[in-house]
Amino acid sequence: MLVLVDRDGVLNEDRPDFVKTPEELVFIPGSLEAVARLNSHGYKVVIVTNQSCIGRGLINEERLAEIHGKLHAGLSAVGGHVDYIFVAPDAPWAATEMRKPGAGMVRAALEKFRVRANDAVLIGDTAGDMKAAKTAGCRRILVRTGKGAATQAAGLDRDLLPVRVAANLSEAVRFILDEKA
Ligand SMILES: [Mg+2]
């Protein structure tokens, strides 16, 4: 079982001006512990994140590695880890299939971890996340953190349903673990 997690607005606070430094990576309370719970139950956890700040020239790969260094350290401090981080660096005006709502990253994750789409669930805060998961055939959970409340209020296209809605990553993880039990 594979859990695909969007980064901004799910693990850490979303910023309209992008997370450009480790200092700007502010964890949403309980999110790191939620990943650790998945780890301890044997789930693989991967991040699938659009980082157009690279394609826009705002940060480079080296800076992104520093930001993710803080993420790895934060997870490690609570006994958690992520198995991989997929990044789509594309600017919106030069988007490839890797950039969500494209399904490229989700498909790459399924392939890398040799998981069938119906054994994977994606947790995200935008319609683009839900679309990427739906196109790849994965189950979907929308969290209300980040852009999630606005996404829910705006309504999701019928073809993206069913989507389960959770208050935050902690609750999303509870849904997943309860289903297994
Ligand atoms: Mg997001």
Image (cartoon, rainbow, N blue to C red):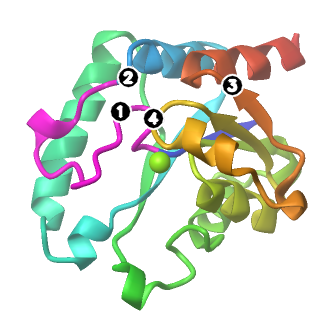
Label 1 crowd (10 A; few <14 / some 14-19 / many >=20)? many
Q: Marks 3/2: CA distance? A: 14 Å
Residue nearest the viewer, comparing 80 with 112: 80
Give the amino acid type for the residue marked by disc 2 in the picture.
Ile
Give the amino acid type for the residue marked by disc 4 in the picture.
Val
Q: Residue at x 58, y 31 (%)?
A: 144
Give the amino acid type for the residue marked by disc 3 in the picture.
Ala
Q: Quadrant of residue 100?
A: bottom right
Judge whether residue 158 can be spotted in this image: yes
Residue range corresponding to the magenta coloring:
7-27
- Residue 166 tag number: 3
Label 1 near ligand 1 (CB < 8 Å): no
Residue topped by disc 4: 82
| The C terminus sits in image quarter | top right
Q: Main secondary structure of the magenta part?
A: loop
Q: Marks 1/2: CA distance? A: 5 Å
Residue topped by disc 2: 28
Residue 68 as seen in the image, left or right of residue 92:
left
Q: Residue at x 52, y 75 (%)?
A: 98
Q: Residue at x 11, y 60 (%)?
A: 62
| Residue 73 colored in magenta in the image | no
Give the amino acid type for the residue marked by disc 1 in the picture.
Asn
